[in-house]
Image (tube, helix red, strand yellow):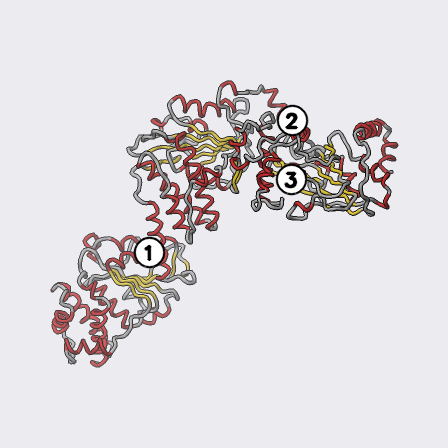
Amino acid sequence: MFVHKKINELRDFFTPLRNRPAQCVYFYRINGANDDVRKFVRDYYKAALENGVIIEGNIPNPDNRQIGFYAERLGTTFTLDKQRIISDLSKWLPRMSPYTRDTVGGSIYEVLIGLRNEGKNDGILKNAYIKFMCWLYYKFERITVLLGTDRVPKILYEGELTNYELLLFSVLTGSGCDAVILQYRGDALYKKLDPTSAKSDLLELPGMTAFPDGYNIKTVRTEIAAEEERARLYGDAPLVVPCVNAWMKGEGFDDARTLLVDRGRENMTYYSCFMRIFGCESKATYPNDVFHLHSDAANVGRKTLIFDQKIPDPDPRETGSVIRRNYQRPEDLIRDMAAQIRANDMQLQRLMVKAFVDVMLIEVGHGEPLNKLGIFAVYLICWMRRYYVQLFDGWTMPNVAQILYLGSVRDDREALFLQFMARLPVDVLILIPNAEGSCTLRDELLFDKHYEESAQLDRIPREVSELRLGTTAYHAERELDQLMYQDSGLYRNQQYSRADSITLRTMYEEIEILWNEEARFRPNFSTDNGIVCIPVLFAQVSGIKDGKTSDYWKAVSRLVTDDTYLITRQLPLSLQGPNPFMNQTGQFFTRGGLYRDAIKAHPGYQYGYLRLEVQERILDKLEMLLDSRLIKGTYENGIENLIVATILHLPLEIMRRIQAFDFTKVPPKLLYIKTSEGMVPPEDAIIAAFLNLMGFDVLFFAPTGYRCVASYYTREVLDEHQLGEYKYDLRIPDLSRAAEKNRKRAEKAKSGSGWSLFRKRSK
């Protein structure tokens, strides 16, 4: 008979019989789990499924049919005799070898002798014998032929053992079988059957805790199915393997510039780095250091891809080329998307598929919803296709390309793309010049290098001519500049390039107070993460207080400033000659976004002379206006075409105000006076909504009280002020000189004494 011994480690269960000490078996019960135990149970389940028996709950007692068949084959008499038992086994389980019959027969005999020694009578011994034989035939026959072989058969049992089940397992383990018992309610009931743990051993490992609620063999089976399905997602494994960061010395830029041949020379291994560098060794040389990262790589034939602050989003044509279906499970989505990955080299394609599946499964583990996973997958594939030639054209082992990303990664999709690339033959370097900067990207492969000094760099120099190296005095001045303008309430000219607007709800009397107020002094102004939040006015003033038209026009004239775009005519704002975009807008956008390159390439594009960030901001807000569907009929009856054509053909005076707008100063104005019947032209309603998004103060005066502009909008976005009596067909006075008068009045007020200034403000 075989004896059970204690294991040294969990994988001893999978050791062939010939390599075990004294050819022993293992019989363990498990009352809790940790990560290692849960993995062991999954592996043991697989082994039992292939070469053993899995029992979920108690083994049913033999029924009358089974007992009748036993009596027919072996008779009804019973004698406790070892040779009789071996003889019965030859008839009952003829597939067993003579050696196995002797072992099993001897094991059954020893168990029954033990029962007799406990005082059990022959009737009980007979019942136990019949039960053992029926269970062996109907439940364990498949493993009886394997007992004593090098591949030790496995029994996996969950639940509370009965006495006869424990005795049967003693028979089977004594005959050359391993057994594992999962006891979810602890050891108390087992100890009543085997107080000294003579028949089995208890597994005790550091970190084990009680099984979680709901854990059972069914959940193990589900986990295994999920693992196997995920393994199938990868397809054929690549023959080449990555070595990410392990070769580095932790020296930041010096590591990144290390030649590939000096990183390592293991066969079928490429050596890459995934590194994020905060700050710099010297702010005076930082631009030069960054420049040489890619210039040195180019000199030895390495491909480089550079991103400044952002990876351009895929355009609708790119996203449209990715085939998508309706998915019910993440695995279906990942499998379908991975099948669309193509490369000219088979090993590279397998690497790409593996990297794609790896990062997508990370997001599945984070609990991301299925629709967001779909967006991530589309972006990864679009970007991979877009940059494939720049990074991998003609790739051979052990070449490694390079990606330089300047700035903090704040977009989840960009972070995932960089994680994806870092698992391919690519050095991924994230450069954050600010030593105190932050970054949302998290990855177990990522190495962080911190320097104490901070530098200022908005764009990675591509050519030597782009390098602008500051002197020591220059950087000292920049440090002083930071002290003065960082969270101090002071702002230098054009300090910010990004802004969003919020509309203030005010009393009518507050309009004149806020009208000439700088944005930084207005309620709810903020500058977070380099983005200015501009509080603006977007309102309609209806009626005339007490019907006094002279006071009404005086109040209007006080709002006319040098920065006010005044509209008194009843022609569309955009009526400034033929619109070159009209009837051509279909090539510029879809519901997924704008085709920005197509817009800029159009011969009628008039914003090319503006600063690049201003151009992008105009297109951003145009896209926002479309996505918001604020204008009635957007994506319903073709109004979206009018929106695009109108915003791409704004009046020159409005463009000058957009170009000059400093987000912390007084916002530019659109003052629109409508005294006649009817509504404003739809183009004007579109421009007004757009300028509100751009950070303009927009104010409509309608003495008639008509909804002259609000009817174009799907939501109540205008802050309406009802002053009093409605008046019709009023003649608009000449307001052209009001701006000059208001400016002189303001200059005179500034030149007066503090007391007179106080009195004027008081009045």
Q: Amino acid at mark 3?
A: Ile
**How far is disc 2 from disc 1 in space, using C-alphas?**
62 Å
Residue mark closest to the camera, 1 vs 3 = 3
Circle 3 residue: 686
Residue 567's spot in the image, x, y percent?
73, 34
Residue 455's spot in the image, x, y percent?
56, 27
Dot 2 or dot 1, earlier in sequence: 1
In front of the other: 613 or 731: 731
In front of the other: 507 or 88: 507
The quadrant holding residue 523 is: top right
Can the viewer see residue 712?
Answer: yes
Circle 1 residue: 42
Residue 591's spot in the image, x, y percent?
52, 42
Instruction: Locate residue 83 relative to residue 527 in the image: left or right.
Output: left
In front of the other: 447 or 566: 566
Q: Quadrant of the C terminus?
A: top right
Circle 2 residue: 480
Q: Quadrant of the N terminus?
A: bottom left
Q: Secondary structure at mark 3?
A: helix
Dot 3 or dot 2, earlier in sequence: 2
Residue mark closest to the camera, 3 vs 2 = 3
Instruction: Locate residue 51 relative to residue 650 in the image: left or right.
Output: left
Indicate which disc residue 575 carries: none
The quadrant holding residue 105 is: bottom left
Residue 439's spot in the image, x, y percent?
52, 38
Q: Secondary structure at mark 1?
A: helix
Can the viewer see residue 483?
Answer: no
Q: Secondary structure at mark 2?
A: helix
Q: Amino acid at mark 1?
A: Arg
